[in-house]
Image (spheres, rainbow, N blue to C red):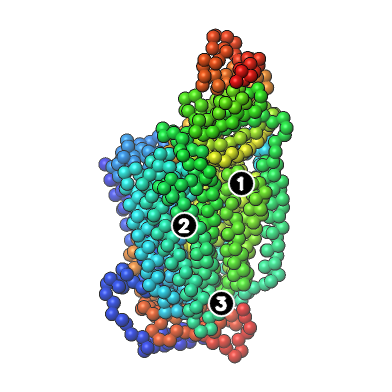
């Protein structure tokens, strides 16, 4: 078999040890203040997982309230104390949980946990670099994130409670401690945590961009990059261009909160306090600043998942990704359009209708590159030879969810429908499917696929299969019925629907959704057990290239040290998707083009 | 006690699953990686098709149970709402077709092209023709939706007909205040520093002569069936949102920046009670923008009545001016409700 020769050729190359010397590493420099991109990736991943568990747990708690609004659970009081007096979650605690769940999952899990992990891990390995352009900045990026995490966590324990005004933190609610106890010191900590988080993601993003542009190995032209790297590149660009806007918005918010400025405040009379002196500000200004990040943020979350899914799908279909250039073009189109659609979150704020119409047009335009991606994934599967590795299953699940959630985006992007569906459960269903769960699926796909590279061991397949099927079915069972609630106009962020004649008929459905949510959450614990158990006890990887993939990370030793390749960095001779070409199962990127090889890509 | 028991049971289940999974891994090592991979492939390929079939059955069952509970089943209660519903169905049809086709292809391909030693992979890296087709078709379809959507959008956000009545809606933590302009059909000016929760909840400037016949009510708003209503929406503290699910509309209430929305109610509350078969039916205003800990209870009611009933109700209302200055109320002595002439006299005096 020719591909076996290829494989052996590599191993010989991989064991070539000269030219590399281990520098002295202490526990502190290896595991804590590490500058090795692979270790930093693992730090991001595990911190992200801790947050995912906390954020998930919060959703279980508030789903408990939504599913069983009349019941009381004495054990809740023993866990939550005054947050659950008499065994029932208080509205204050409910809103704090909803807010923190959103903030944590959007920023700490699906931004830091997802692109922090995979950008760090994959960029140097897949472009053929020994590390990031600035390993030190990379380390800083993690430690800013860690500090942000600690501060966000500590905001949960302040006397007046954590911030409770929704993850979007619209002023005046977020600016006025008198309007909501959660907007007192809890909000200050929330802003500080977010500011540090933004610093972290800027440090990371600049580093990713610099690394991808400057540090590709010989022969690795931009159009030979795996789609993962392209996706991570656009993600970093989006982050670098949009996060500063959020930061500036938040700085203005700090001023309004603490220094009596009126950027966002005007004409306000607070119950029990009286008229405030602020005049002339605009609460809508904050929404513009927020969503100028907020919408690109959706793609910051989604693009890495898309990239990884493209890669994993091609590897496991044993077939090139269909339409590499179209995939690339659509990523680019999405990245550009991401900056031009933010006001579709604001159709009902009294936005100028003409402006609104432009945003309708641009928003629905995003459906075109999204459709291209979906059809290209489908064509990649067509006439392939699919191996259902856990990573591949999650990639297929991602596409299914992306279709389902993407299509409802066409409903919401059309202002005339949004005027009915805005801020209802329809929106919850839409963004949880397309952004939340789908990106989680991308993340799971990535973890299962690159776990062997991270730890030199495999995760347990059976657990992974159970995890996949329960999560896929569960995600649909939770979020599909929510569309119907949204069509009935059932608003988001309600603590209790029992006083509403228009919405209380969904009580049974809410109970059903809550029950499924708990089961799905429990299934995620299976993943956690699998992950941590496999780090130490998983089946050992014995071949360098367990998935028989083309990309460069599989030319490193099974457990690559700092510097990734013990010898020379391999030279790249082809694009990464030569699967099934000329009857060969796969041809890695570092294999020179043969004399009689057909002209491919 | 039952808590610890259930925790123990759940833990036990986890351990059992975990042990089985571990055992299955040992088995697969014994059988050889190749053999176990093939087996796993078969199982998961089969599950793909099972999921597809069960999924579509689930979608159908879900629809049977939940469709009657959505508002689509009872129909919209405003002219605008009917257009929204029509658009919902058009969008549903288009996205529904795409949904069914793509999901079937996805899971069918996954099942059909699962690994098979005899299959030779088709090296198919790109096809400009195909890519052009699936760029053009979505683009054309979306154009249709955009055109439809924008026509409605400009109708919804456009000027209401001339005969529209105007009501000012003000959100506060956690309730709604409604102001009617009174006989002069002009709202008196207001300034937020004049707000007095007891007598002047929106901060009316009493020196403005148009203000003295303004009528304030809380929680319930009366509108007339068939008459367009224009709402001028504001907030006195944080951002709220006037959510009218039966009329299929909503608009934010932003402090300092007035917004507007208009609609034409088609059925009276009484008619809707009969239509929905629910004797407790009410047109509820739900706050749809997170506004604090009482957000979920910020409810208002719209009573849609016929003109006659509306006039009767309006006749009973007393201008807020007389609540603020009871001594100026000409009807302070028990008498009939304020009439046209007395109100005009009152305003002329100022």
Residue depicted at 63% across the width and 83% down the height? A599
From the top left corner, tell me how far across and down residue A516 is, in percent: 44, 48
Residue A524's x, y, as percent?
40, 56
Q: CA distance from mark 1 to mark 3?
A: 41 Å
Quadrant location of the C terminus of chain B? top right
Q: Residue at x 46, y 43 (%)?
A: A173
> Height in image: A424 above or below A577?
above
Q: Is residue B158 above or below residue A536?
A: above
Give the secondary structure at mark 2. helix
The earlier-in-sequence mark between 1 and 3 is 3
At x 45% / y 54%, what residue is drawn? A251
Q: Residues within 10 Å of mark 1 (few under 14, many from 20)?
A: some
Q: Which residue is mark 2?
A: A247
* Residue neighbourhood size for the residue with mark 3, other residues' Cα within 10 Å, grouped as few (<14), some (14–19), many (≥20): some
Drawn side of residue A27 relative to residue A238, left or right: left
Numbered tag placed on residue A222 in the rendering: 3
Between discs 1 and 2, the one toward the N terminus: 2
Disc 3: which chain? A
Is mark 1 in CB contact (under 8 Å) with mark 2? Answer: no
Q: Does residue B250 appear left or right of residue A129 in this picture?
A: right
Q: Position of residue A126 (x, y in %)?
A: 48, 76
- Lower sequence index among marks 3 and 2: 3
Query: Disc 1 marks which residue?
Result: A351
Q: Is residue B261 left or right of residue A522?
A: right
Closer-to-camera residue (A339/A463): A339
Q: Farthest bottom residue?
A: A595
Q: Using the numbered discs, state the Cα–Cα distance from disc 3 to disc 2 in whole angstroms.
A: 31 Å
Q: Looking at the image, which is closer to me, A366 or B102?
A: A366
């Amino acid at each position: 078999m020719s591909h076996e020769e290829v494989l052996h050729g590599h191993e010989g190359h991989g064991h070539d040890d000269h030219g590399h010397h281990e520098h002295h590493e202490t526990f502190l420099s290896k595991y804590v203040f590490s500058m090795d991109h692979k270790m930093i990736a693992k730090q991001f991943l595990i911190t992200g997982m801790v947050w995912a568990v906390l954020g998930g747990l919060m959703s279980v708690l508030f789903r408990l309230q939504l599913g069983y609004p009349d019941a009381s659970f004495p054990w809740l009081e023993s866990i939550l104390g005054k947050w659950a007096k008499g065994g029932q979650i208080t509205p204050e605690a409910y809103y704090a949980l909803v807010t923190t769940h959103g903030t944590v999952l959007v920023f700490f899990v699906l931004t830091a946990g997802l692109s922090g992990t995979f950008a760090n891990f994959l960029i140097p390995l897949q472009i053929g670099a020994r590390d990031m352009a600035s390993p030190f900045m990379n380390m800083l990026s993690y430690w800013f994130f860690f500090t942000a995490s600690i501060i966000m966590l500590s905001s949960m324990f302040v006397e007046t409670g954590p911030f409770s005004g929704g993850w979007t933190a619209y002023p005046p609610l977020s600016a006025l401690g008198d309007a909501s106890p959660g907007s007192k010191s809890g909000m200050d900590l929330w802003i500080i945590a977010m500011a540090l988080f933004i610093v972290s993601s800027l440090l990371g993003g600049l580093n990713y961009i610099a690394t991808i542009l400057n540090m590709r190995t010989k022969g690795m032209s931009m159009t030979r990059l795996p789609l993962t790297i392209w996706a991570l590149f656009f993600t970093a660009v989006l982050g670098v261009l949009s996060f500063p806007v959020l930061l500036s918005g938040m700085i203005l918010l700090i001023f309004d909160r603490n220094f009596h400025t009126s950027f966002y405040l005007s004409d306000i009379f607070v119950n029990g306090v009286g008229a405030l002196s602020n005049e002339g500000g605009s609460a809508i200004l904050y929404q513009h600043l927020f969503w100028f990040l907020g919408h690109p943020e959706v793609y910051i979350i989604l693009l890495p998942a898309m990239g990884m899914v493209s890669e994993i799908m091609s590897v496991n279909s044993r077939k090139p990704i269909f339409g590499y250039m179209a995939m690339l073009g659509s990523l680019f189109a999405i990245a550009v359009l991401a900056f031009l659609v933010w006001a579709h979150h604001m159709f009902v704020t009294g936005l100028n209708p003409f402006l609104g119409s432009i945003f309708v047009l641009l928003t629905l335009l995003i459906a075109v590159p999204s459709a291209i991606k979906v059809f290209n994934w489908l064509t990649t599967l067509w006439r392939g030879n699919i191996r259902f590795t856990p990573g591949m299953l999650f990639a297929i699940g991602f596409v299914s969810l992306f279709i389902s959630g993407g299509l409802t985006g066409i409903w919401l992007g059309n202002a005339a429908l949004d005027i009915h569906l805005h801020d209802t459960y329809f929106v919850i269903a839409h963004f949880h499917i397309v952004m939340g769960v789908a990106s989680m699926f991308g993340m799971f796909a990535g973890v299962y696929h690159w776990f062997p590279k991270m730890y030199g061991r495999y995760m347990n397949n059976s657990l992974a299969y159970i995890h996949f099927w329960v999560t896929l079915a569960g995600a649909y069972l939770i979020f599909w019925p929510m569309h119907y609630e949204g069509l009935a106009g059932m608003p988001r962020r309600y603590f209790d629907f029992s006083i509403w004649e228009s919405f209380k008929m969904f009580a049974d459905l809410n109970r059903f959704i809550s029950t499924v949510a708990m089961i799905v959450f429990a299934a995620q614990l299976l993943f956690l057990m699998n992950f941590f158990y496999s780090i130490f006890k998983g089946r050992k990887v014995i071949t360098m290239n367990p998935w028989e993939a083309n990309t460069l990370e599989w030319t490193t030793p099974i457990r690559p040290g700092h510097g990734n390749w013990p010898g020379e960095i391999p030279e790249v001779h082809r694009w990464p998707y030569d699967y099934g070409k000329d009857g060969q199962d796969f041809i890695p990127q570092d294999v020179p083009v043969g004399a009689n090889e057909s002209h491919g890509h | 006690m039952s808590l610890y028991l259930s925790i123990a049971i759940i833990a036990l289940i986890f351990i059992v699953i975990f042990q089985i999974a571990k055992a299955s891994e040992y088995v697969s090592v014994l059988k050889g990686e190749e053999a176990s991979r093939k087996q796993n492939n078969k199982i998961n390929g089969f599950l793909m098709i099972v999921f597809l079939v069960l999924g579509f059955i689930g979608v159908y069952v879900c629809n049977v149970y939940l469709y009657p509970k959505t508002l689509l089943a009872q129909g919209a209660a405003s002219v605008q709402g009917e257009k929204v519903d029509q658009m919902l169905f058009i969008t549903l049809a288009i996205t529904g077709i795409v949904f069914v086709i793509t999901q079937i292809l996805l899971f069918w391909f996954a099942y059909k092209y699962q690994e098979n030693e005899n299959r030779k992979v088709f090296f198919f890296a790109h096809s400009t023709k195909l890519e052009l087709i699936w760029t053009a078709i979505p683009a054309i379809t979306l154009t249709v939706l955009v055109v439809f959507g924008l026509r409605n959008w400009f109708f919804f956000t456009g000027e209401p007909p001339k005969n529209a009545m105007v009501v000012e809606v003000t959100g506060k933590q956690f309730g709604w205040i409604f102001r009617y302009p009174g006989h002069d059909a002009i709202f008196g000016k207001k300034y937020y520093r004049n707000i007095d929760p007891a007598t002047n909840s929106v901060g009316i400037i009493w020196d403005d002569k148009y203000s003295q016949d303004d009528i304030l009510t809380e929680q319930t708003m009366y509108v007339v069936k068939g008459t367009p209503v224009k709402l001028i929406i504001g907030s006195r503290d944080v951002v709220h949102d006037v959510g009218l699910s039966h009329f299929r509309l909503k608009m934010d209430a932003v402090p300092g920046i007035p917004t507007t929305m208009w609609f034409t109610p088609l059925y009276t509350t009484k008619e809707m009670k009969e239509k929905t078969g629910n004797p407790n039916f009410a047109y509820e205003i739900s706050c749809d923008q997170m506004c604090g800990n009482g957000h979920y209870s910020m409810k208002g009611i719209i009573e849609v009545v016929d003109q006659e009933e509306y006039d009767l109700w309006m006749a009973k209302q007393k201008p807020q001016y007389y609540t603020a200055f009871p001594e100026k109320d000409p009807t302070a002595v028990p008498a009939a409700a304020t009439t046209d002439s007395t109100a005009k006299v009152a305003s002329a005096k100022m």
